[in-house]
Image (tube, coloured by chain):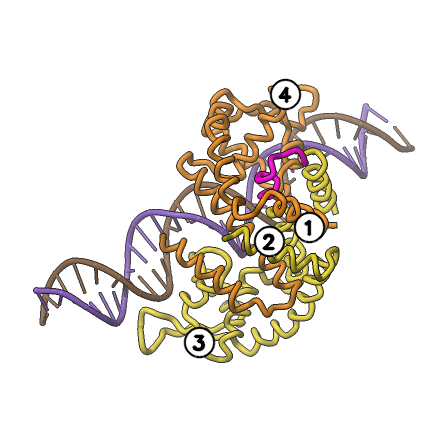
Chain colours: A orange, B yellow, C brown, D purple
DNA sequence: ATCATACATTTGTATATACAATTGTTGTAT
DNA sequence: ATACAACAATTGTATATACAAATGTATGAT
């Protein structure tokens, strides 16, 4: 609660006292604050299930393979964040029995990573809760406005 | 270079293969990717000067006080990220002689934190480089579009 | 004046991020 | 066949993030 209050104050501060900032700087700041805002929201949903956002992302990537194994490069290619420490992410998922890892038979440099039934079950549980939170996080804008926002964000990245 | 390529592939992937995602989910993803994009850009500028984004932010907050001291709460209130580890951020700035810390005389629970001349000098050096990068990061959009983007981001946070 | 409470900072632990270096495996050139 | 380069994953180190707990100081109630 305290953190939440501080955080609100923070945003207010930025919006109010810094609206005279140069447009570019204001944009970078605004995107960052919104991103942190979203991340906090998703995190609050995952917290009771003792799983981090990154771990959740890895699980969803593995589910997307429909029973086929992934190796680390596959996973990293689909992650938003950088390539590194995916080994350690998988380690933690293994400890929770959400994932299994084997040496790849065709290429012993690679590893085959599978999501377990337990992992699939957790995802099934989380899916609707995450979706609800995502809707909540974006419901201040009309559908049309959201489309515009997505368009601008895509365009700004070039 | 490798990371850069991977990263581009990543974005392309998301935009191309995931444009059918629900609007809310797509928005959350798009904001996150853009935020990481911006962060990477700023980071690449700061890297040669051996200073992290968070350390840079603390320095700018201190400069904003124009010679008056800040305590940790002041700093945390103005940071985008959460309250914690600000002590350690300041520790690192002290090691670099960019900042000084004293026990507050009026209230010995607090600390007075000052930016040093060396800290001010570094900021003066970094200011134009950061600004240039911010312009570069946002130059794919027209001024008008950037204003719209900022408006939508402000509105989405409610 | 004492005690409980609130305040401000610090410390500890787990996880995540960023990058460099290392290990082990495979492919290729000679 | 051997040596070298490329590949895939792992490990190490420093920093940042998130939260809980501890420390020390000030304030208020009685």
Give the magenta-colored segment's residue range: B19-29
* Circles 3 and 2 on the same subunit: yes
* Mark 2 burial class by Cα count in 10 Å: few <14, some 14-19, many 20+: some
Subunit ID for the residue under disc 3? B
Q: Which mark is residue B152?
A: 2
Q: Position of residue B108 (x, y in %)?
A: 31, 72
Q: Which mark is residue A68?
A: 4
In this rendered view, identify the residue nearer to me: B89 or B16: B16
Q: Which mark is residue B80?
A: none
Cα distance between the residues tagged 3 and 2: 36 Å
Q: Position of residue A40 (x, y in %)?
A: 48, 47
Residue B89 in view, yes or no: no
Please report whichever mark, 3 or 2, sits nearer to the chain's N-terminal start: 3
Assign a secondary structure to mark 2: helix
Give the labeled residue for mark 1: A152
Residue contact between numbered discs 3 and 1, judged by CB atoms under 8 Å:
no
* Mark 1 burial class by Cα count in 10 Å: few <14, some 14-19, many 20+: some
Subunit ID for the residue under disc 1? A
Residue B118 in view, yes or no: yes
């Amino acid at each position: 609660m305290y953190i939440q209050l501080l955080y609100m104050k923070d945003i207010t501060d930025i919006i109010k006292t810094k609206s005279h900032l140069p447009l570019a700087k204001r944009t970078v700041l605004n995107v960052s604050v919104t991103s942190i805002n979203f991340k906090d929201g998703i995190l609050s949903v995952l917290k009771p299930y003792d799983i981090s956002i990154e771990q959740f992302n890895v699980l969803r990537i593995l589910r997307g393979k429909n029973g086929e194994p992934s190796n680390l490069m596959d996973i990293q290619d689909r992650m938003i964040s950088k390539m590194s420490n995916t080994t350690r992410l998988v380690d933690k998922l293994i400890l929770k029995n959400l994932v299994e890892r084997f040496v790849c038979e065709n290429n012993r440099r690679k590893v085959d990573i599978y999501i377990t039934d337990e992992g699939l079950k957790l995802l099934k549980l989380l899916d609707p809760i995450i979706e609800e939170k995502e809707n909540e996080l974006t419901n201040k804008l009309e559908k049309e406005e959201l489309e515009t926002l997505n368009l601008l964000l895509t365009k700004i990245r070039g």
